[in-house]
Amino acid sequence: MGAPYQGDQSAYFLSVNRNKRGIAVDLKTARGRDIALRIADRATSWWKIFGRELRAGWGSAYNDLSARNPQLIYASISGVWSDRPYCV
């Protein structure tokens, strides 16, 4: 028996994501980076869970974002060890 669903979404997903918004942007494009930085300007927290190729070079480092938004709570996490040879 699976989890209860509301349409195509599970009740658990709906309960933990209540009143949250989501967006997908391509951070490899200038437009996507601009959108992300404008979001960071108004955000209360920033969770950085990017692969190595997106970690630097587009203004998402703590010093860059805290200069734009001094009230921002910044967290950087990785799902895998970033110093391992097969990490992205």
Image: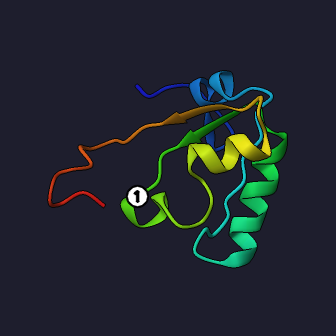
Query: 54 or 16: which is nearer to us?
Result: 54
Q: Position of residue 64 (x, y in %)?
A: 65, 51
Residue 83, horizontal then vertical, whole percent: 20, 50
18 above or below 77?
above
Residue lying furthest left in this view?
85
- Residue drawn at (57%, 75%) of the image: 28
Residue closest to the eye, 17 or 54: 54
Q: Is residue 20 above or below residue 40?
A: above
Q: Amino acid at mark 1?
A: Gly
Q: Is residue 72 left or right of residue 76?
A: right
Dot 1: within a 10 Å radius of its alpha carbon, few (fewer than 14), some, or many (20 or more) residues? some
Q: Secondary structure at mark 1?
A: loop
Q: Which residue is mark 1?
A: 51
Where residue 79 sits: x, y (%)?
34, 41
Image-quadrant location for residue 69:
top right
The answer to whether 48 appears left or right of 7 in the picture is left
Q: Residue at x 14, y 60 (%)?
A: 85
Who is closer to the viewer here, 61 or 50? 61
Query: What residue is shown at x 60% (from left), y 33% (from top)?
Result: 74
Q: Which of the 4 quarters of the picture holds residue 10?
A: top right
Question: Image quadrant for the N terminus?
Answer: top left
- The quadrant of the picture occupied by the C terminus is bottom left
